[in-house]
Amino acid sequence: MRRFIGLCLVLWCLFCVGWPTLAQTLLGFPPGMFDGRAVLDAASGGGTVLFDAVASAFVVDSGTTTTLSWTHTPVGTPTKAAVAFENYDTNCTVSGVTYGGVSMVQEASQTISAGGSSVQIWALANPSAGAQTVVITCGQHMYTQAGSITVTGGSTVTAIRAANTALATSTTPSVSVTSATGDFIVDVVGSTGANVTTTAGGSQNKRWGPTDAGTNTASSSTLPAGSGSTTMTWTLGSSVTWGQAAVSLHN
């Protein structure tokens, strides 16, 4: 019995460690090609998330508008997609967001005013490659400014690590979100003021905006994340009530 158990252990070690190394040595395959752990790591995360592409659109209600759609064209093979927007109107409750026909998940939402204005971020892991149609569906009276962002690298299973929102009246929106090195932050800031200028803080890259729809203004930015938490800041051209949402796309 001891010999049998010992033989099983030897065969197990040879299968898990020995034969991949032997194959790589004799046949010249690159290291890690037969390593199941590498495949698992690639799917579950551990890589650095990088910006890929952005697209944006807006609509000012015509009385019958119930959807806002646009085409997003990734440059590389995306691992995640995020759609950020400000929606203004109490009658326009967003019922869903799709990317390439696949339903996204609402990850963050912050109501700005009693009139129904809110900022939201929806996300999707492992979206389809190539040009895709993004659709935001609402009830009616649609006043919406929106943008889509795709990234490469990191997990293809888990879209986000964390999300957070903030609400205040000032010229300096700010929100912090839990993150890890290699994550990628996407945020959106929306205000109740029209024609409000927006300046992204620090090393943030403004990806779209400011865009006006009705009496509201919105903008979105991105930033490679730091360990522990990452803070996204803005400077507005005037003091208004603002809402901000941010997510850390998982490494």
Image (cartoon, helix red, strand yellow):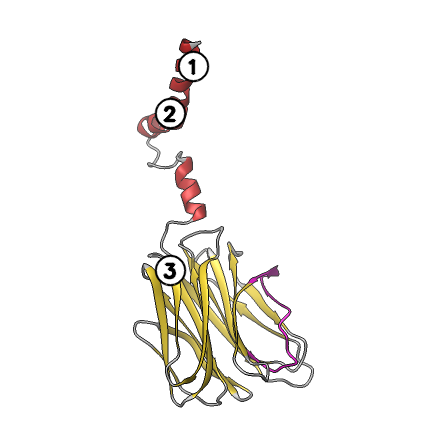
**Marks 1 and 2, the one that precedes in the sequence:** 1
Whether residue 130 is visible, yes or no, is no
- Within the image, what quadrant is residue 52 found in? bottom left
Residue corresponding to mark 1 = 5
Q: Residue at x 39, y 79 (%)?
A: 173
Residue at horizontal 32%, vertical 61%? Answer: 226
Residue 63: give x, y in percent of width and height. 68, 85
Find residue 179 and name its label.
3
87, above or below 194, in the image: above
Q: Residues within 10 Å of mark 1 (few under 14, many from 20)?
A: few
Magenta-drawn stretch contains 96: yes
Residue at the right extreme, as displayed: 64
Q: Please name the amino acid that badge 2 sits on.
A: Trp
Q: Is mark 1 on a helix, strand or loop?
A: helix
Q: Which amino acid does label 3 sit on?
A: Ser
Q: Distance between the residues labelled 2 and 3?
A: 38 Å
Could you say where residue 148 lies in the image, as x and y percent from the top left? 49, 68
Report the disc number at residue 19. Answer: 2
Is residue 10 or residue 55 the one in the foreground? 10
Q: Which amino acid does label 1 sit on?
A: Ile
User: Does residue 74 sit above or below 155 in this rendering?
Assistant: below
Cα distance in 3D space between marks 3 and 1: 45 Å
Magenta span:
87-105
Helix, strand or loop for disc 3: strand
Q: In this view, does 202 lie to the left or right of 87?
A: left
- Which one is earlier in the sequence, the residue at label 3 or at label 1? 1
Apparent side of residue 151 relative to residue 228 in the rendered image (left or right): right
